[in-house]
Image (tube, rainbow, N blue to C red):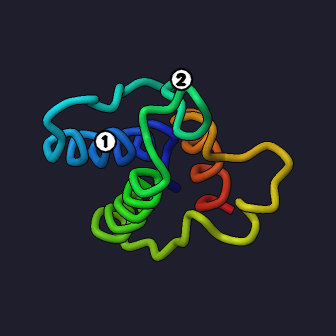
Amino acid sequence: MITEQQITDVIYSVIDQMNELRDQNLIDKGLQTPLIGQRSQLDSVDLVNLLLGVEEQLEDEFDISFVVANEKALSLKNSPFRTVKTLTDYLTDSINQ
C-alpha cells in the first residue's frame, strides 16, 4: 500500500524537477497549489508534463504502471487535477484499490 504522503512526495519531486528547468514563474509546492484553472501556474503542456513525470516516478519508485489521465479521471464530476491535494487523493485511492 502506498501512503498519501508517498504520493505527495512524488508530486513534489516532479514539481522540483519542473522548477529546475524554469527561470521564472516557479510552481508552488503545497497541497492547495492549483493545477488547473485561472489560479494555476501551469499551462496545458506543464500539466501534461507533471502527470507524465508522476507516472514515471511511480513506476521507478514503486514499480507501478499507472496512467494518471485515464478515462476514469477524465469522467469524474470533480476533476482530480484541481490541486495537488485532489491529485494526491485520487492517486492514493486509485492505486490502492
Mark 1 residue element: helix
The answer to whether 44 appears left or right of 49 in the picture is right
The earlier-in-sequence mark between 2 and 1 is 1
Which residue corresponds to mark 1?
15
x then y, percent, for residue 71: 73, 71
Q: Residue at x 25, y 46 (%)?
A: 18
Q: Position of residue 8 (x, y in %)?
A: 43, 39
Labels in figure, total: 2
Percent position of residue 41, x then y: 42, 33
Residue 33 percent location from the top left of the image: 48, 27
Give the residue furthest to the bottom. Answer: 65
Q: Is residue 21 left or right of residue 36?
A: left
The residue that appears at 31% across and 42% down in the rendered structure is 15
Q: Could you say which is closer to the camera, residue 71 or residue 65?
A: 71
Please name the amino acid that badge 2 sits on.
Gln
Which secondary structure, mark 2?
Answer: loop
Q: Residue tagged by mark 2?
A: 32
Q: Residue at the spot x=39%, y=45% of the render?
A: 11
Identify the amino acid type marked 1.
Ile
Image position of 59 with respect to 78: above or below: below
Identify the image quadrant of the C terminus. Answer: bottom right
